[in-house]
Image: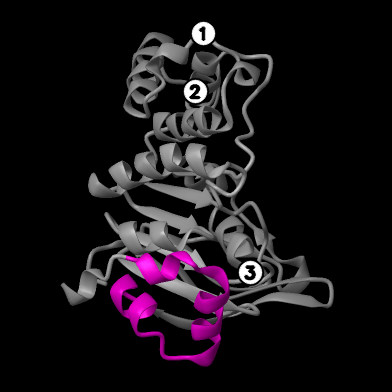
Amino acid sequence: MNDAQPVIEIRDLHKAYGELEVLKGVDIVAPAGHVVSLIGSSGSGKSTLLRCANLLEDSQQGEVMFCGEPVNWKGSGPARRPGDHAQVTRIRTNLSMVFQQFNLWAHMTILQNVMEAPVTVLKRDKAEVEAAARKYLAKVGIGDKCDAYPAQLSGGQQQRAAIARALCMEPKALLFDEPTSALDPELEQEVVKVIKDLAAEGRTMIIVTHDMRLANDVSDHVVFLHQGKIEEEGPPAELFNHPKTDRLQGFLSATVSEHSTLIKSGEN
């Protein structure tokens, strides 16, 4: 990775639910303009790490920094909480999250869904937000769906609407939590194309994904988590084509029929 100011930096993060320790001292850095993908088996801590980065979950130990600014904590251990509500709001509005299940408001049109947070949370001018929302919906390929409701859209279209909603917040980074896992393969490719386009623009992103081809194609850095720890990490060409650990080799063998057709970008 390079020396650019990290948008997100996590150091020695620990997270437990009661006796269940989910993250056991994890370090992640996402510099501006870089894409970091988190891979690993179910239960390895990937989604929890993403939610801790966005302060949707409280961690018990370690540092979370946004653009060099550390989160202010109060308390310690299981009682630790963010100590500055205004800081949390500022960080969350700059880290837009795209969830697996879309989370669109069923009673609002797609345009209203995309406009809602910038207008109500950021208090931006409604006409300006509408223009931006239409622009981002066109960008993700569903500009003709502004007046439709979520139930009238396919899963792939709903996820693209969720991405447009995230973009309309004008965030410093995008966080994706398994953005394609709820979709069938045909619809999945619609969303993959949008994510690839965003990566090509130099957007800062952290992506939790089960799609090894996506991680290979868009990432600057890939992190393989196993039982709450980083087992292996590095550039995608190195990680996918030359895994060093038995656990990563086993994971790739188990997950990927796709692995055999990955573009060996580091060997061309």
Judge by depth and name the residue closer to the eye, 132 or 215: 215
Q: Which residue is mark 3?
A: 45
Q: Nearer the viewer, residue 45 or 5?
A: 45
Q: Are marks 2 and 1 in contact (CB under 8 Å)?
A: no
Image coordinates for residue 260, horizontal then vertical, percent: 39, 71
Q: How many labels were placed on the picture?
A: 3
Q: Quadrant of residue 81?
A: bottom right
Q: Residues within 10 Å of mark 3 (few under 14, many from 20)?
A: many
The three-letter amino acid code for the residue at tag 3 is Gly
Q: Amino acid at mark 2?
A: Val
Residue plotted at (53% across, 46% down): 180
State which quarter of the image contains the N terminus. bottom left
Q: Does the CB distance between marks 2 and 3 fall below 8 Å?
A: no
- Neighbours of disc 2 within 10 Å: few (<14), some (14-19), many (20+): many
The image's mark for residue 183 is none
Q: Is residue 85 left or right of residue 198?
A: right
**Sequence-wise first label, 1 or 3:** 3
The quadrant of the rendering that contains the C terminus is bottom left
Q: In the rendering, at what x and y percent does residue 110 appear?
A: 53, 17
Residue 79, x across and y down, in percent: 77, 67
Residue 201 or 169: which is nearer the viewer? 201
> Is residue 3 highlighted in magenta?
no
Residue beneath disc 1: 147
Determine whether label 1 and label 3 are within 8 Å by CB.
no
Q: Main secondary structure of the magenta part?
A: helix
Range covered by the magenta-colored residues? 234-262
Q: Secondary structure at mark 3?
A: loop
Residue underneath mark 2: 114
**Whether residue 202 is visible:** no
For the residue marked with disc 1, what is the amino acid? Answer: Asp
